[in-house]
Image (cartoon, rainbow, N blue to C red):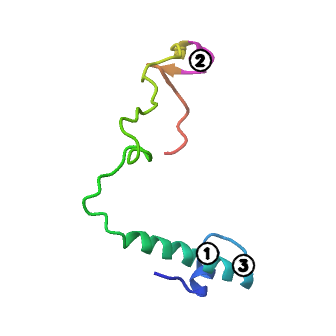
Amino acid sequence: MSLTLSDVTRIAKLAQLEMNEAQSATALEQLNGIFALAEQMQAVDTEGVAPLSHPLAAHMNNIALRLREDIASEPNRRDDYQAVAPKTQDGLYLVPKVIE
């Protein structure tokens, strides 16, 4: 897939970008380069290649992911925060209806 100069000017207009002819030509070259790279990557045969859970997993064994424990570390202060609210109900803030 490749773009034309008219495609780039149309995209720029949709994105509300003001581009002169030189900028459009530069953008066209860069976008077509990106599309060419994507096509090149799509052409690679990845049949039988297992996805990696970590970028270094192919070179190193037993990589421990540095994930923190999923525990609550902050105290629950909902009542303190809602004490200054004009109206609350069941732990929720009540706001005026703005759409009918």
> Relative to 57, is 25 above or below?
below
Provide residue 17's location: percent of width, then percent of height: 69, 71
What's the distance in space between the residues labelled 1 and 2, CA to CA? 50 Å
Disc 3 designates what residue?
A: 23
Indicate the secondary structure of the residue bearing disc 2.
helix
Q: Is residue 85 magenta?
A: yes
Residue at position x 72%, y 85% in the image: 21
> Relative to 60, is 34 above or below?
below
Residue at position x 25%, y 59% in the image: 48
Of label 1 and label 3, which has the lower sequence position? 3
What's the distance in space between the residues labelled 1 and 3, CA to CA? 11 Å
Residue at position x 43%, y 19% in the image: 71
Say which amino acid is labelled 2: Tyr
Label drawn at residue 81: 2
Provide residue 88's location: percent of width, then percent of height: 52, 20
Q: Is residue 3 magenta?
A: no
Q: Residues within 10 Å of mark 1 (few under 14, many from 20)?
A: few
* Residues under numbered marks 1 and 3 in contact, where contact means CB atoms less than 8 Å apart: no
Q: Which SS does the magenta portion mostly show?
A: loop
Say which amino acid is labelled 3: Gln
Comparing marks 2 and 3, which lies closer to the viewer?
Answer: 3
Task: Say which of 57 and 2 sits in front.
Answer: 57
Of label 1 and label 2, which has the lower sequence position? 1
Residue range highlighted in magenta: 80-87
Quadrant, the N terminus: bottom left
Label drawn at residue 42: none
* Residues under numbered marks 1 and 2 in contact, where contact means CB atoms less than 8 Å apart: no
